[in-house]
Amino acid sequence: MFFGADRQTRKRLSRLQSHLKRENPLLTDMVRSFRRLDKLGYRLGLLRRDQSYAMMIPWWPLISILGTFSAGKSSFINHYLQADLQDTGNQAVDDKFTVVCYSHEGEQRVLPGIALDADPRFPFYQMSEELELVAPGQGSRIDAYLQLKTCAAEKLRGTILIDSPGFDADAQRDSTLRITDYIIDLSDLVLVFFDARHPEPGAMRDTLKHLVGDTISRSDSSKFLYILNQIDVTAREDNPEAVVGAWQRAIAQQGLTAGKFFSIYNPDVAIPIEDEALRERYESKRDQDLELIHDRMQQVSVERSYRIIDALEKTAREIEEQTVPRLIELKRKWERATLWRAGVIYTLLFGATLGATIWAGYWNGLSFNAPRLSSLLDSTLSQYIGLISVLLLLFGLFHVARRSAAKKIVSQMRKGQEATIEKERLIRAFVWNTRFWNSIFRPQPAGWGALARRRLKRVYADADRFIQILNDRYADPSGGKTKPPVAEKAEASAASQSSQASALEPEPEPLPESPPEPGEQRSEAATAETDTEQDVADSKTSDLEREKDGARQVH
């Protein structure tokens, strides 16, 4: 753990940086910040050598489509992509989470779940480990939960969609809910679908609780859109207000009284509405809400960068404010348990030794006389050997007490809470701190000190700098920046053709370099096989190259 990422992980991160550099050079700088955070994770024992914080998040914009079964999720995706990609039907059609991404090939392909579990560029990387914690034995059945589909639809360029199975009354409910939680955390946008044919609370109990009740207090609750789909079924009774009202009351019962609500239906599979006035009324509402939803889906490329920065800072703060204090607490508990066990062992050893010598007749009152022992220790060498033997015995017994106390604490941790990846990392870090070379009297966790704090401060500074760069790209509060001549010409040309002309963004500013932190300056030759070399090599990218690469990704 201490020596950093293994060769395979470094290669994966390098390939990730190469892919991202062609799209947005700022993202490559974010990868370097994650790798800086990795160093701390390795030293604390939180990460294995084949792991990286950079491989725990999706680097492409991610839109998740969740909800009850037969709520029209798959047909919505087909209509949005204008492709017959997902199977549709009135009953539960797909029982897997489907990741949909772009492919330049015209032929659509379906790949097994292992394609996602083994590739850090996609969501669900190493998801089999998470499943194994929830349901032992399910990690090897990753193909039963996940699949990857490719499509040449232009709207998929640079974006990943996830279509989920409905999890109400699902046979694999616990595992499905765990995966749902996982993708909610990773997503830039979450579309929650409900079926207008069954708006009553009883028909969507789990959906209401898990996707409404459990999400309203999230700091990123604004990324949730609540959609009542297939509203065209109400045209026969002409009671859309009653259906929408029942749906919103069901949502309000879970505590959500304000949010983004939409009522739509798929024009490709809609029920014919014969009344022209009624049809126009339904189509107007549908088109208006679909336009808003589609516009929101197109904005995720911008929100993706902010989400990654937030993940970087959040991970750093969790280490400093939660993981390290928890490790300090566990070390203190381990110290007390070790000393107590060692005291008991030494007391028993002393009592057994005293009893044996009394039984052997070595005591005359308070005087100790052991002729055989004296003859064995008549030389200086034998005395040293005897002393060393006693010390080794005491040290061995103390080590037994250390291991026993550590195992007891780990057992309590595993039983106390639900198994999660985060808890497993904490257990791994605690076990790392109980190695024989780590003293129980050291108050701080192994790997935590002044250098670690400086590294975290640099990560915080990187996050703030990234935010400022993005703000400069997409916002101009002072109004002092002028648009490039190319943008002005583009606007003038677009205005003559359409009333919806759009301006090109100002050219992104290069990322300012921060000074190297102490203790990290090494020569390239000395670090040829370490991730530090990659940091040094990547930092040599010139500002001019960053500007050129950044300009290519503007619109």
Image (cartoon, grey):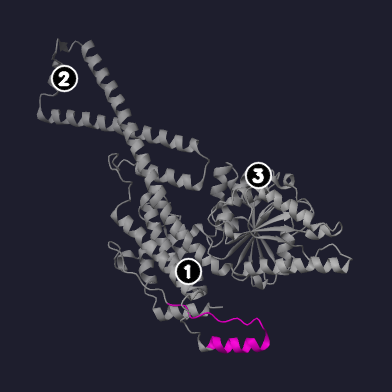
Circles 2 and 3: CB atoms closer than 8 Å: no
Q: Is residue 254 left or right of residue 220?
A: right
Q: Quadrant of the C terminus?
A: bottom right
Q: Residue furthest right?
A: 274
Report x, y in % for residue 275: 89, 66
Snapshot quadrant of residue 362? top left
Q: Which residue is mark 2?
A: 373
Q: Element type at marker 2?
A: helix
Where residue 407 appears, as percent x and y from the top left, is 41, 35
Residue 529, visible in the rendered structure: no
Amino acid carrying label 1: it is Leu
Picture disc at residue 173: 3
In the image, residue 505 above or below residue 239: below
Magenta residues, start to end: 486-509
Identity, as a three-letter code, of the amino acid under mark 3: Arg
Q: Residue at x 28, y 26 (%)?
A: 343
Relative image position of residue 119 (x, y in whole percent): 54, 60
Give whichever of discs 2 and 3 has the lower sequence position: 3
Find the distance from the CA under tag 3 to the CA under tag 1. Answer: 36 Å
> Magenta includes 502?
yes
Label 3 secondary element: helix
Asked which secondary structure carries label 1, the reply is helix
Q: Is residue 42 visible?
A: yes
* Residue matched to label 1: 27
